[in-house]
Amino acid sequence: MLTIIAIVQAKEGREKELEQLLLTLVERTRKETGCIRYDLHRHLDRQGKFIFYESWTDSAALEQHRKTPHIAEFRTKAADLLAGPLQVDLCEMISDPIG
């Protein structure tokens, strides 16, 4: 299983717009084949900072996700909303999952 931790920071004054855009990704992405978990978090101490915690069955599922129309749409729309580049950390789970 692959885990992604992705972090984005909104431009000042664009926090709500970015949040709404990110929430549309959640709904669409959770329906994708190979998506185990796709959760969006709002940072409590840094306004406009959002963190995705994602789990995917394998690298093929993740690669397919990156090619979806909703990710392409996100990239286009987010260009004006982000304060900097998207930070993405790719991880591999090495412990047994809970449950």
Image: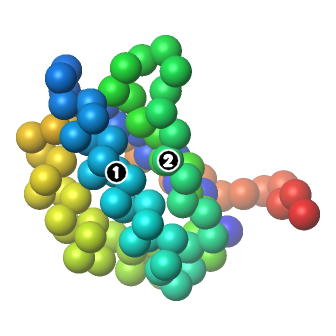
Q: Is residue 79 left or right of residue 47?
A: left
What residue is drawn where x is 62% and y is 76%? 57
What residue is drawn where x is 61% and y is 63%? 37
What residue is drawn where x is 63% and y is 70%? 36
Closer to the chain start, of discs 2 and 1, is 1
**Residue 98 picture quarter:** bottom right
| Type of amino acid at the residue the image marks with label 2 | Leu
Q: Nearer the viewer, residue 1 or 35?
A: 35
Q: Is residue 50 left or right of residue 78?
A: right
| Type of amino acid at the residue the image marks with label 1 | Leu
Q: Specify whether residue 85 is in view.
A: no
Label 2–label 1 contact, CB within 8 A: yes
Residue farthest bottom in this picture: 33
- Where does the image place residue 82, in percent across and percent down from the top left? 20, 36
User: In the image, is residue 79 above or below residue 64?
Assistant: above
User: Which residue position is annotated with label 2?
Assistant: 40
Q: Which structural element holds mark 1?
A: helix
- Where does the image place residue 38, in percent across and percent down from the top left? 54, 60
What residue is drawn where x is 52% and y is 84%? 33
Q: Nearer the viewer, residue 26 or 59?
A: 26
Q: Nearer the viewer, residue 30 or 54?
A: 30
Instruction: Identify the mark at residue 22; answer none if there is no mark.
Output: 1
Distance of mark 2 from mark 1, alpha carbons?
8 Å
In the picture, the quarter occupied by the N terminus is bottom right
Q: Specify whether residue 91 is in view.
A: yes
User: In the image, is residue 23 above or below residue 33?
Assistant: above
- Where does the image place residue 40, in percent across and percent down from the top left? 49, 47
Q: Is residue 98 left or right of residue 65?
A: right
Dot 2, how many residues are within 10 Å of its Cα: few (below 14), some (14-19), or many (20+)? some
In the picture, the quarter occupied by the C terminus is bottom right
